[in-house]
Amino acid sequence: MQALLSLGCKTTGLLDRLGEFVPQLLLRFFIAYEFWEAGIEKFNGENWFYDFRGEFPFPFNVINADVSWFLATWTELAGAAAMVIGLGTRFAAASLIILDIVAWYSVHAENGYNVCSNGFKLPLIYLMVLIAILLSGPGKASLDHFIKEKFCSK
């Protein structure tokens, strides 16, 4: 029985140590991939924001569609890069949250929940991941953590 308890304690300790690195890293990589794909699609594609600009919430509906397209494209690409290396992670998460809410409101909200009908399920998932990253930080496997440990007083 003692051997089984000891094994359980060692396993829990290992999982606790992995928990300081792995969950945030996985969340960052997941969200980075999703926004990188969207940014690349915009970078290589045609600007369809003209069709939705009237649906954007204020103040985004008064911004020129080309400017909105540029900002969305580069927020997605730069935000994804920041997530991968873990630098400026909370700022990137906040920026992507704003982008996600605008997309949810203007493109997905009226289509219901279902992904197959371009509904708001994916924007909701992205929002939950981004809020988790914003509130808990990038984790120990990040440049933000290294900078905090090196330069911030304890």
Image (cartoon, rainbow, N blue to C red):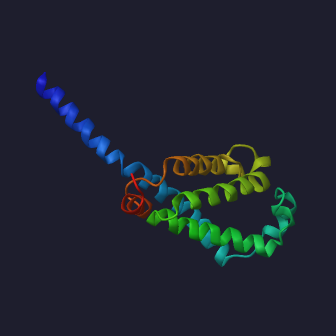
Residue 135, percent from left and from top = 54, 47
- Residue furthest to the front in view is 153
Q: How many labels does the image show?
A: 0
- Residue furthest to the bottom in view is 44
Choose between 37 and 15: the one closer to the eye. 15
Residue 146, percent from left and from top = 38, 62
Q: Which residue is drawn at 59% across and 46% down?
A: 128
Q: Going by the image, does 96 lie left or right of 85?
A: right
Q: Residue at x 72, y 50 (%)?
A: 117
Choose between 24 and 135: the one closer to the eye. 135
Q: Going by the image, does 140 lie left or right of 58?
A: left
* Quadrant position of residue 70: bottom right
Q: Going by the image, does 47 lie left or right of 128?
A: right
Indicate the quadrant containing the N terminus: top left, top right, bottom left or bottom right.
top left
Residue 61, percent from left and from top = 85, 62
Residue 103, percent from left and from top = 73, 57
Q: Going by the image, does 118 lie left or right of 93?
A: right
* Quadrant position of residue 71: bottom right
